[in-house]
Every structure is written in structure tokens, then in C-alpha cells.
Image (tube, rainbow, N blue to C red):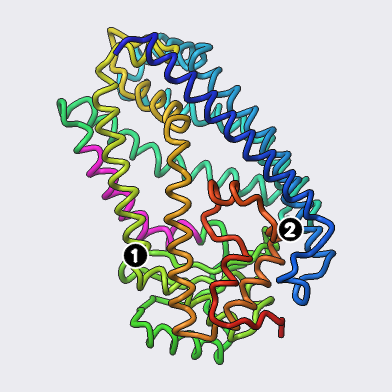
């Protein structure tokens, strides 16, 4: 691979993706702003003008912040690659650490330093998002102490899990010959499957409290629904989501016998029992329609292709030189190749995101249809409307922006597809 060709291809992909992101973001903000003064006709009887305008203002605030985050991220990407930041970091650690800790230790240090520096770059953005935007619109309930504690625990858990995984992948890359990418993929898949089992019972409780669903009547109703749907879970739990945010949600987690149903306490406070049942039926629809398995298979398949591509690129000197780095002749370049690949892949894959979003929206419609067959469609419509309002999701997104990014259908399309026309709140 010729270095100049890769450099030109990377710059072209980066500029094209940036231009598209800016164009879509400005379209979204103009469209939301233009429709801020009036509630859409379909929602006149169910959404107040105040709530509609709050959603518009929240969307605009996040849009402006997104432009700032895009600028910072793009500058960091160029700094790491073509401006030589990663090459300088690699050279420093190679000279200082490789003679002391060996090849594997030096490469782990390079990965860790890259992650730490990247996290420090993003730290002010995360703080501003939490304590300015989310705070301004009444969603943030975190204290600075809790935010710092979450960050410390997250870093510790990430190190305890990530470093052994990285060490294993690097060992495979250095000791498995030309097919290392296939063995690394198998190890990565196995790791993710194990993590699905361990996350609900070991990792998630480090950050939130999970208590058994206390409402016996609701518990019986939910259990009856799961029995009708042929779904077995290890337990029904309520999570203290209100400790961090006013946003509401419900989800399934785990794999096999470790599956559990989790409700945010904010969700239970807002929805009626029938609406909770309908939301849960929607989530069950994802399992019954095998959406979860399809998504996992898709992710695993794409990761196999990505690692196979990396297996070829890592052996090309032009891959490093074309992205602002120089491969070492006296030490392995596996960690350097991994980091470069992770950095430059997003601009090239950005234009695939509309396809992924489309598939996700189709799955949401299918899950809604399943929920209407197992629960009351009117309850589902009312629940979705409440969740849109509580989360300040705009009712008037730009259609093209929504097609490109939205993993869930816009509220107007989603509610129009439900069999029940009744959207009046209880």
C-alpha cells in the first residue's frame, strides 16, 4: 500500500464525513427551530406548547454542543494521526519502557496512555454535557462527587477488564502467524459472551442499586406477560436511575439463564401498570423477533471483516506512514496498528450508518407490532408519548437527519403505526 494514497483517502473520507455531519446538524437545528412555535397537529390534544418548546430547545442545545464535540474530536483525530501525536507517544514509550518492561508491557502502556489521554480530552465535554446541558433542562441529578466516583470506578473496571483482554489480543497477534486475526476474533467473541453473563450481576451493581420489583400487583402482571410470551428471566429489578438522571428507561440484560428485566425507578413513577406492561411487551418483541441475536451476529460478522482487514493492513508499511506514524524495526507494532485502525475506521464507515439506523427502525416497528398483540396498543401509545415528553425528544426532527441517524422512528411515524388511535393521557 502506498502511503500517499492512504493519506489522500483518509483526508477525503474525513472531509466528506465532516461536511455531511455539519450539513445534517444544521438542517436538524433549522428544522426544529422553524417548528418550535407550534405543536404538530397530531399532538395538539396530548402535548402542551411548553413541553414542545422545551424539547425543541433541548434538541438545539444538544445540536450546538454536538458541533463543538465534532470540532474537538476532529482536531484530536488529526493530532493523533497526520500531525504525529501517536507517533511521538509511541516513540517516547518505546525508548523509555520497552527496555524495562519488554515488548508486551510497552504495547500495553501505549494502549493505556492512548485511552487515558483520549479520556482527558473528552472530560471537559462530558462535564459540560452533564452539568450544563442536562442540568439546564432538569435532567441531571448527579453531584460532582458522584460524577467523579463514577469516573474513578469506570476507569478501574475498564482497566481490570480491558488490560487482560488487550494483553491476550496482543499475544495472539504476535504469536499466531498470518491468521492471528481469526484467533483474535474468536477470543473477542468469547469475551463479549462472558461479559453478557457477568455484567448484570457483577459490573452493573458497582454503579447502581438493583432491588426486586416491590409492587406485587405489577409483578404478577409482568410475570403473566412473560409467561404468555414464553420468556424466562432470572428476576425483575428496579434500578435507581433517578440518582443520576430524570430520563426513564427499561431494558433486558444478560444472556441465557442470567437474563433479567430492569426498570428505571423514574419509569415506574411515570407510567401506569398497563403502560409498563406495554413497554415491557415491546422489549420482549425484540427477543421474540430475534433482533438481539441478529444484531449480535451483525456486530460479530463486521468485527471479523474488520480484523481481517487489519490483518492485511498491519503488514503494510504504507499503512503506518500514510497515517503519520513510523513502524518500529526493533519491536512489535501490533498496538500501534490497533490504535491507528480504531482511529481511522470511523470516517470510512460513517456512510454505512444510515443503513444500520434503517434496520434498527424496522426492528422497532416490529417490536411495537408484537407489543400490540400481547398488550394494549393504547397503553403503548400513551407510554411512548410520555417517554418522548419526559426525555424532551423533539416531535419535529428534520426528516433527512432522522433517516440518517435515528435508531428509533420519529414519534409521529411510530405512533401513527400503532393500531390504537387513542393518545389521550390517563
Q: What secondary structure is found at the residue carrying circle 2?
A: loop
Q: Position of residue 34 (x, y in %)?
A: 79, 50
Q: Position of residue 15 (x, y in %)?
A: 54, 23
52 vs 225: above or below? above
In magenta stretch: residue 400: no
Q: Quadrant of the C terminus?
A: bottom right
Q: Quadrant of residue 389?
A: bottom right
| 35 relative to 217 in the view: left or right | right
6 vs 411: above or below? above
Q: What secondary structure is found at the residue carrying circle 1?
A: loop
Q: Is residue 131 visible?
A: no
Q: Is residue 1 visible?
A: yes
Magenta: main secondary structure? helix
| 276 relative to 90 in the view: left or right | right
**Residue behind mark 1:** 255
Q: Residues within 10 Å of mark 1 (few under 14, many from 20)?
A: some
**Residue behind mark 2:** 139
Number of numbered discs overlaid on the protein picture:
2
384 vs 377: above or below? above
In magenta stretch: residue 202: yes
CA gap, disc 1 and disc 2: 31 Å
| 332 relative to 353 in the view: left or right | left
Nearest to N terminus: mark 1 or mark 2: 2
Tell me which segment is drawn in magenta. Answer: 183-204
Amino acid at each position: 500500500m502506498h502511503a500517499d494514497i492512504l493519506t489522500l483517502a483518509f483526508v477525503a473520507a474525513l472531509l466528506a464525513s465532516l461536511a455531511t455531519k455539519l450539513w445534517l446538524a444544521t438542517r436538524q437545528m433549522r428544522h426544529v427551530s422553524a417548528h418550535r412555535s407550534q405543536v404538530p397537529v397530531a399532538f395538539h390534544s396530548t402535548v402542551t406548547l411548553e413541553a414542545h418548546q422545551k424539547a425543541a430547545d433541548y434538541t438545539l442545545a444538544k445540536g450546538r454542543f454536538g458541533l463543538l464535540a465534532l470540532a474537538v474530536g476532529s482536531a484530536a483525530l488529526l493530532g493523533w494521526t497526520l500531525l504525529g501525536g501517536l507517533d511521538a507517544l509511541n516513540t517516547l514509550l518505546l525508548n523509555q519502557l520497552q527496555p524495562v518492561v519488554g515488548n508486551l508491557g510497552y504495547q500495553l502502556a501505549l494502549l493505556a496512555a492512548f485511552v487515558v489521554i483520549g479520556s482527558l480530552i473528552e472530560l471537559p465535554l462530558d462535564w459540560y454535557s452533564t452539568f450544563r446541558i442536562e442540568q439546564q433542562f432538569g435532567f441531571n441529578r448527579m453531584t460532582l462527587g458522584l460524577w467523579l466516583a463514577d469516573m474513578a470506578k469506570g476507569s478501574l473496571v475498564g482497566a481490570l477488564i480491558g488490560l487482560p483482554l488487550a494483553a491476550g489480543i496482543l499475544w495472539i497477534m504476535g504469536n499466531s502467524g498470518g491468521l492471528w486475526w481469526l484467533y483474535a476474533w474468536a477470543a473477542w467473541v468469547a469475551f463479549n459472551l462472558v461479559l453478557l453473563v457477568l455484567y448484570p450481576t457483577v459490573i452493573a451493581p458497582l454503579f447502581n442499586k438493583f432491588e426486586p420489583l416491590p409492587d406485587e400487583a405489577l409483578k404478577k402482571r409482568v410475570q403473566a406477560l412473560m409467561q404468555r410470551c414464553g420468556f424466562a428471566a432470572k428476576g425483575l429489578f428496579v434500578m435507581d436511575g433517578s440518582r443520576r438522571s430524570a430520563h426513564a428507561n427499561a431494558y433486558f440484560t444478560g444472556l441465557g439463564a442470567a437474563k433479567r428485566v430492569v426498570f428505571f425507578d423514574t419509569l415506574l413513577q411515570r407510567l401506569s401498570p398497563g403502560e409498563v406492561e406495554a413497554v415491557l411487551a415491546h422489549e420482549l418483541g425484540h427477543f421474540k423477533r430475534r433482533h438481539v441475536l441478529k444484531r449480535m451476529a451483525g456486530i460479530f460478522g463486521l468485527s471479523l471483516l474488520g480484523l481481517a482487514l487489519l490483518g492485511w493492513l498491519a503488514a503494510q508499511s504504507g499503512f503506518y506512514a500514510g497515517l503519520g506514524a513510523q513502524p518500529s524495526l526493533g519491536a512489535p507494532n501490533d498496538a500501534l496498528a490497533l490504535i491507528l485502525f480504531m482511529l481511522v475506521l470511523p470516517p470510512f464507515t460513517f456512510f454505512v450508518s444510515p443503513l444500520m439506523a434503517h434496520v434498527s427502525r424496522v426492528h422497532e416497528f416490529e417490536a411495537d407490532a408484537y407489543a400490540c398483540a400481547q398488550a394494549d396498543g393504547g397503553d403503548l401509545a400513551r407510554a411512548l408519548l410520555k417517554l418522548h415528553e419526559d426525555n424532551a425528544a423533539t416531535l419535529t426532527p428534520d426528516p433527512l437527519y432522522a433517516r440518517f441517524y435515528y435508531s428509533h422512528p420519529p414519534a409521529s411515524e411510530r405512533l401513527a403505526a400503532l393500531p390504537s388511535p387513542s393518545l389521550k393521557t390517563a
